[in-house]
């Protein structure tokens, strides 16, 4: 039987404990007993991926904006935490309140990409919840999915009670109302499912039954409710509601996209024929420039982020992008906030935009020509030319960028070896543009992925190339590229293979998932965890030849997602496929009239574009660029240097953050508190803040410090203490702030109290005495295959047993020289067992400078 065990008891035994701490800025902890509906939102991958996901944050804040609804979060644990939970028979719990997932009324699971499906199994198994919906009666939480994979969720459909297709901002409130009604009126599960199925966009898998032929293809998909033979995607007609976007969650641990993301538009109608997002997020709905500025001001002010990312499927296609970018930079450049546009279409990254981007930091961007040849770009309806790409490279190199990143695909329909060779030619031409600039080394980074046919796209019927063919094409590109100046990276063809299996898979894959999970499949999106052999074996056990899922589909074949409608008509997709084979172009409906895809009714559902291409004025006043002077990062005019030491304590779970994570946390707290620091010069300006000796992960401290260099003096150090403490997480407490010379101690002595979980054993006490009697104690450390030896005896000035379970330790440290960690005293000097050492409480009680004694 599984049970609840406090999560912090497991933190000493995992490699990245910061993933499991919670207490992030703007996280919401509501009164558990006062909530009528309790929901936990789950991202089925590691914390650093899930915390970068905008969709989960949007739903989290909308739910918690309701008085009687409580929403918390959970992410998939890594293998080490999973092992600990299983060994201790502990249940997976929520991040905010540490409640088991079974305590919630509603579990919402994001479906972001196919290679996270095995993580859904991990989460439900660790939560002690039956995997299949048919095995869960009304006593279990309702499990609802949603996200970009919801338009073909069939491989995991058996695990869910319901799945939301499309936008969730409005639908989730209707769902929570029904969950409340269920609790209030004690509705049977069958009645609740029936009512849920009436919500626009909500798919109840148990109300549809796929029927198979002997060959394994789908013969029919039978709707058990004849009045609802299909489910239509839910679409939010406009994005004008923004209040839930103004208080972003701010991670304490390092995440993949560690910045403020602002969605400036949703949807894209460029019409790339391989692109699923271009279909399932239609129509284009742009936010107004004023709304974007409002979100950015509030979000940056309430987060402390120093980077703003403008998010969209194609950010450069936002109709007011140039004046918006200028206004944003005019507003935030003086605060050293950089702006990035991670998704740029070739031809939209103009010289004006690059001039603005470089005013603070030259943030990176990736251009996606997708195919190397003009012919293949016509097939996929990319609508760009080679000259567009080379012009962008030329402008970027001239303006100081040293690296250009390109994303391309192999295996696209009609592709030949000439198209593969064209990728190499394109890379070489781009490199020559950099060489022509003549100002230092220039680099072209090429990223290659294997094309995976996606549901609801014109290419949904096409074949996916196999693993060996992918490898051969990658090998051909690699051998033809020069050894310097062009860097090639590629997505593992084996991972693309499995993605392709699930992308167009059906309900038979639920059994494959469970079998593969039992065989060890975990975290398949991570190359260091992925093992295709496990999936091959599971396929054999389930009688499912996996290669068959990559085959071409017949035009009249019933597809697994036939009953799930994106809103775009199948006839439009068929026409686009035919146009691909004759290389015909379909223009963007934003600017060239309706292309008859069937989605818009032009009453509620229609494109929302802030400025048409023929408009000479846009809706936002743009100042001319204020940073035309070619100075990377000038110091603030007439800036002074007023230095202050900030003393703080670090106790409790927050001590499990690493040193770099602690630095970032402090930087952001200072920004939120309105404390402006001086910045370093160079290409990547950073706050002028100096920290003391890095505290080992898991070690608490009553006496830490950092020194900050400010352009103006503080009005009140007492008020500054209060301001900072309002912005810091529990356990991190500023004690005092005082003027300081800015000189960092180079030699210091630190004092620690160590409280062990059990009395010291006689042999451990004997080793302690032996250590004190020695003049030398050599300690060997190994890292990355290299070993170093250090004599730690001169570094320990005191080691005293004060009680049966308590030690007092004093150590010396000199800048630039290796030191000794308190836990090493336990494991190497006393030879204490790993578990007892890891669960000992180590507290740094004080430090003092030894610089004068060293002089």
Image (tube, rainbow, N blue to C red):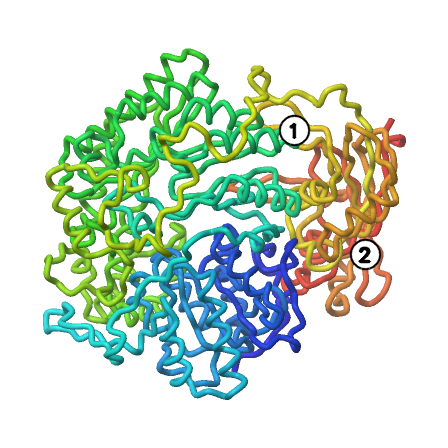
Rendering coords of residue 275 (x, y %): 28, 47
Image quadrant occupied by the C terminus: top right
Which circle, 2 or 1, is nearer the viewer? 1
Res. 352 mark: none
The residue depicted at 66 percent of the width and 78 percent of the height is: 33
Res. 753 mark: 2
Rendering coords of residue 7 (x, y %): 62, 67
The residue depicted at 24 percent of the width and 24 percent of the height is: 425
Q: Is residue 543 left or right of residue 524?
A: left
Residue 80 visible in the picture: no
- To which quarter of the image does residue 402 belong? top left
Rendering coords of residue 141 (x, y %): 48, 78
Residue underneath mark 1: 334
Front residue (pair 626, 832): 626
Front residue (pair 680, 517): 680
Count of all numbered marks drawn on residues in the image? 2
Placement of 354 over or under 475, stated as above or below:
above
Along the polypeptide, which appears first: circle 2 or circle 1?
Answer: 1
Residue 529 visible in the picture: yes
Placement of 827 over or under 659, stated as above or below:
below
The residue depicted at 21 percent of the width and 40 percent of the height is: 586
The residue depicted at 54 percent of the width and 75 percent of the height is: 104
Front residue (pair 361, 347): 347
Q: How many C-alpha atoms fall within 10 Å of the one at disc 1: few (<14), some, or many (≥20)?
A: some
């Amino acid at each position: 039987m599984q049970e609840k065990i406090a999560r912090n008891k497991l933190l000493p035994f995992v490699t990245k404990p910061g993933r499991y701490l919670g207490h992030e800025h703007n996280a919401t902890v509501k009164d558990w007993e006062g909530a009528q509906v309790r929901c936990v939102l789950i991202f089925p991958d590691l914390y650093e991926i899930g915390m970068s996901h905008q969709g989960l944050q949007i739903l989290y804040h909308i739910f918690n904006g309701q008085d009687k609804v409580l929403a918390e979060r959970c992410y998939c644990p890594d293998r080490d935490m999973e092992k600990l939970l299983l060994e201790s028979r502990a249940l997976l719990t929520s991040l905010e309140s540490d409640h088991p997932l079974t305590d919630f009324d509603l579990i919402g699971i994001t479906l972001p990409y196919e290679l996270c499906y095995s993580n859904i199994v991990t989460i439900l198994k660790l939560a002690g919840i039956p995997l299949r919906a048919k095995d869960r009666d009304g006593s279990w939480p309702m499990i609802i999915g949603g996200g970009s994979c919801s338009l073909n969720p069939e491989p995991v459909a058996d695990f869910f009670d319901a799945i939301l297709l499309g936008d969730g901002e409005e639908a989730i409130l209707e769902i929570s109302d029904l969950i409340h009604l269920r609790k209030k009126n004690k509705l049977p599960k069958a009645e609740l499912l029936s009512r849920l199925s009436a919500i626009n966009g909500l798919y109840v898998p148990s109300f549809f039954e796929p029927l198979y032929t002997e060959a394994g293809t789908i013969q029919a998909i039978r709707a058990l409710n004849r009045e609802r033979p299909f489910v239509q995607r839910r679409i939010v007609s406009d994005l004008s509601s923004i209040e839930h976007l103004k208080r972003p969650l701010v991670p304490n641990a390092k995440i993949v996209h560690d910045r403020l993301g602002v969605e400036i538009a949703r949807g894209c109608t460029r019409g790339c024929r391989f692109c699923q997002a271009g279909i399932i997020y239609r129509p284009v709905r742009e936010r107004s420039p004023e709304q974007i500025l409002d979100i950015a001001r509030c979000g940056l002010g309430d987060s402390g982020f120093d980077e703003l990312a403008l998010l969209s499927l194609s950010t450069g296609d936002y109709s007011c992008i140039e004046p918006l970018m200028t206004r944003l930079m005019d507003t935030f450049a003086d605060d050293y906030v950089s702006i990035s546009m991670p998704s740029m279409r070739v031809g939209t990254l103009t010289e004006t935009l690059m001039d603005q981007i470089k005013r603070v930091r030259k943030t990176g961007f990736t251009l996606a020509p997708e195919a190397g040849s003009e012919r293949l770009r016509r097939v996929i309806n990319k609508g760009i030319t080679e000259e567009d790409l080379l012009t962008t490279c030329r402008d970027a190199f001239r303006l100081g960028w040293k690296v250009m990143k390109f994303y391309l695909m192999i295996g696209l329909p009609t592709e030949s070896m000439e198209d593969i060779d064209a990728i190499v030619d394109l890379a070489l031409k781009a490199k020559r543009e950099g060489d022509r600039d003549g100002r230092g080394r220039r680099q072209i980074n090429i990223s290659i992925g294997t094309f995976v046919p996606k549901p609801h796209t014109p290419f949904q019927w096409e074949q996916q190339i196999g693993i060996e063919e992918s490898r051969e094409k990658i090998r051909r590109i690699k051998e033809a590229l020069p050894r310097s100046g062009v860097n090639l990276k590629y997505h593992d063809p084996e991972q693309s293979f499995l993605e392709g299996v699930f992308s167009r898979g059906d309900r038979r894959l639920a059994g494959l998932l469970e079998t593969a999970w039992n065989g060890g499949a975990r975290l398949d999106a991570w190359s260091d965890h992925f093992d295709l052999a496990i999936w091959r074996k599971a396929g054999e056990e389930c009688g499912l030849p996996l290669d068959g899922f990559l085959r071409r589909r017949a035009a009249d074949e019933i597809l697994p997602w036939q009953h799930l409608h994106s809103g775009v008509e199948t006839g439009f997709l068929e026409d686009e496929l035919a146009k691909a084979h004759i290389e015909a172009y379909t223009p963007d409906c934003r600017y060239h009239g309706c292309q008859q895809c069937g989605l818009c009714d032009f009453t509620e559902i229609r494109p929302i574009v802030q400025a048409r291409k023929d408009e000479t004025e846009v809706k936002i006043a743009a100042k001319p660029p204020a940073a035309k002077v070619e100075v990377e990062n000038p110091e603030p005019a007439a800036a002074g240097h007023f230095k202050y030491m900030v003393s703080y304590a670090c106790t409790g779970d927050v001590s499990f953050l690493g040193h770099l994570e602690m630095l970032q946390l402090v930087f952001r707290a200072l920004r939120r508190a309105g404390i402006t620091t001086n910045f370093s010069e160079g290409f990547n300006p950073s706050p002028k803040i100096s920290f003391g000796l890095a505290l080992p992960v898991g070690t608490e401290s009553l006496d830490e410090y950092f020194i900050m260099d400010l352009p103006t003096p503080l009005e009140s150090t007492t008020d500054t203490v209060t301001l900072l403490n309002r912005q810091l997480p529990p356990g991190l407490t500023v004690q005092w702030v005082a003027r300081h010379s800015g000189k960092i101690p180079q030699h210091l002595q630190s004092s620690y109290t160590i409280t062990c979980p059990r009395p010291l054993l006689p042999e451990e006490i004997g080793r302690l005495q032996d250590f004190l009697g020695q003049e030398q104690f050599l300690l060997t450390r190994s890292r990355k295959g290299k070993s170093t030896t250090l004599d730690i005896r001169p570094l320990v000035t005191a080691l005293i047993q004060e009680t049966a379970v308590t030690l007092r330790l004093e150590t010396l440290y000199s800048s630039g020289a290796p030191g000794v960690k308190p836990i090493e005293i336990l494991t190497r000097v006393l030879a204490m067992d790993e578990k007892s050492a890891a669960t000992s409480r180590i507290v740094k009680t004080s430090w003092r400078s030894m610089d004068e004694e060293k002089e």
